[in-house]
């Protein structure tokens, strides 16, 4: 993020995993199926490389 001149901090809370349930087929890959669909989750616009 320094390369993007972004001074905000990223904080992630790690909690114990709970049971995971797949969504119904209509909701799988929603934004792929509906490119202009609504998604209330907004990113910060910075892509970071994966770390091992």
Image: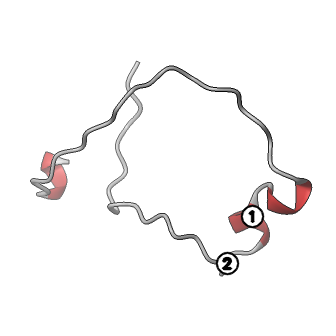
Quadrant containing the C terminus is top left
**Tag 2, which secondary structure?**
loop
Residue shown at 14% from the left, 53% from the top: 8
Give the mark nearest the N terminus, 2 or 1: 1
The picture quadrant where one finds residue 27 is: bottom right
Mark 2 crowdedness (10 Å alpha carbons): few <14, some 14-19, many ≥20: few
- Say the numbered circle drawn on residue 37: 2
Callout 2 touching callout 1 (CB < 8 Å)? yes
Question: In the displayed image of the protein, which residue is found farthest to the right?
Answer: 25
Residue shown at 62% from the left, 26% from the top: 18
Mark 1 crowdedness (10 Å alpha carbons): few <14, some 14-19, many ≥20: some
**Circle 1 residue:** 30
Residue shown at 25% from the left, 39% from the top: 11
> How many labels were placed on the picture?
2
Q: Nearer the viewer, residue 40 or 43?
A: 40
The picture quadrant where one finds residue 32 is: bottom right
Question: In the displayed image of the protein, which residue is found farthest to the bottom?
Answer: 36
Q: Nearer the viewer, residue 24 or 31?
A: 24
Rendered position, 23 above or below 38: above
Residue shown at 34% from the left, 43% from the top: 48
Q: x, y percentage for residue 5?
A: 11, 57
Q: Is residue 37 left or right of 47 when viewed as pictured?
A: right
The picture quadrant where one finds residue 49 is: top left
């Amino acid at each position: 993020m320094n390369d993007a001149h972004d001074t905000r901090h990223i904080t992630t809370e790690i909690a114990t995993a709970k049971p995971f349930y797949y969504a119904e087929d209509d909701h799988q890959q929603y934004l792929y199926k509906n490119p202009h669909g609504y998604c209330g989750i907004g990113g910060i616009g910075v892509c970071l490389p994966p770390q091992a």
